Amino acid sequence: MRIVGAAGLTPALDGIHPFNSDVVMSFTSDPRTFTISRFSNGYTYVSSGGQGFALADPGGAYSKVVSPGETDKFLLGQLTIGSGVPLDYVRYTVSTLQIAAVQYCALGVTTALTDFPTAPTVDFTTFALRGIAYDRSSGSLLLYSLEQSGMQFSVDQVSSTVGVTMHLVGNSGSGGTKDFGTFSGTAPLNGITGGYAGTLDSTPNSVTAQFSGAFFGSQAKEFGFAFNLGRMAGSPSDYDLVIIGTAQGTR
């Protein structure tokens, strides 16, 4: 998922990329380097310690100096669930580019198509979310994290669909919270990649919302997807609310 914006303004949505398409990531261990290719554009990041990221989750930070005083940043994170247990097979990334873009992605050891559970319904019970909400509904741009949000996620093997419900709650960092509403949707399972991509309906806000992801580990033990949503303030290019992030969990 990708958003584009300028300082002080609510960013604009830049579409959804189904899992295993459009964006390719590769890793080299010596030196520790990530390369991200999106269409014809390539971005290479080298290991850089903190580099401006608060590493609340195990992972690593990478960077690329674009020009004096201007650095692209890339974070590889591993979410923890429940009482702090890290997920085994799925990770997330956040990258910021010099064109004022922010990208979230879910990646990891994907589940083979021949290794999916055979039960008619597969429910996931423990979840974690990371992301950011850009809210300009009050007139000034406010940013919120999404760690206090909740969700449900399941797979219907009979209809080959996934179902997701997210209750997104923002935390301002200074003790303030904001309820952004509940978002639900379904998506068909891709019989070739094992991924899924769909749209979300919202209550009470009328927004455009999308999600895309896959399953990870043996017997689809874990899931992970990226999501974004936006609410128009008036003109087709003017948003007063944009939310972007990743949701992950285990059975």
Image (cartoon, grey):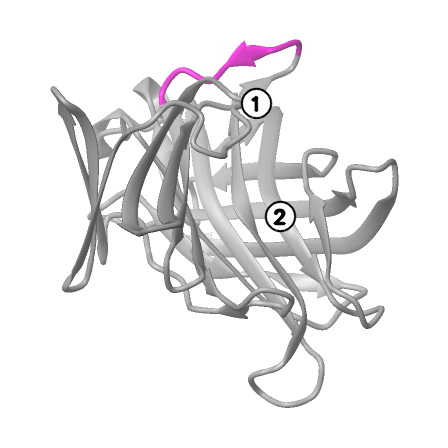
Measured in 3D between alpha carbons, the distance from the residue under mark 1 to the one under mark 2, in whole angstroms, is 14 Å
**Three-letter code, disc 2:** Ile
User: Label 1: which residue?
Assistant: 56
* Residue at screen point 59% across, 62% down: 229
**Three-letter code, disc 1:** Ala
In the image, residue 27 lies at what x, y percent? 17, 30
* Residue at screen point 33% across, 46% down: 195
Specify whether 213 is left or right of 13.
left
* Magenta-span inclusion, residue 92: no
Q: Which mark is residue 96?
A: none
Q: Nearer the viewer, residue 234 or 107?
A: 234
State whether the magenta stretch is mostly helix, strand or loop: loop
SS at mark 2 in the image? strand
Specify whether 98 is left or right of 205.
left
In the image, residue 88 lies at what x, y percent? 40, 15
Q: Nearer the viewer, residue 119 or 101?
A: 101
- When the figure is inspected, residue 171 is found, relative to residue 101, above or below; the finding is above
- When the figure is inspected, residue 112 is found, relative to residue 187, above or below; the finding is above
User: Label 2: which residue?
Assistant: 132
Q: In the image, which residues are magenta?
A: 83-89
Crowd tier of the residue under label 2, counting other residues whose Cα lies within 10 Å: few below 14, some 14–19, many 20 or above: many
- When the figure is inspected, residue 14 is found, relative to residue 59, above or below; the finding is below
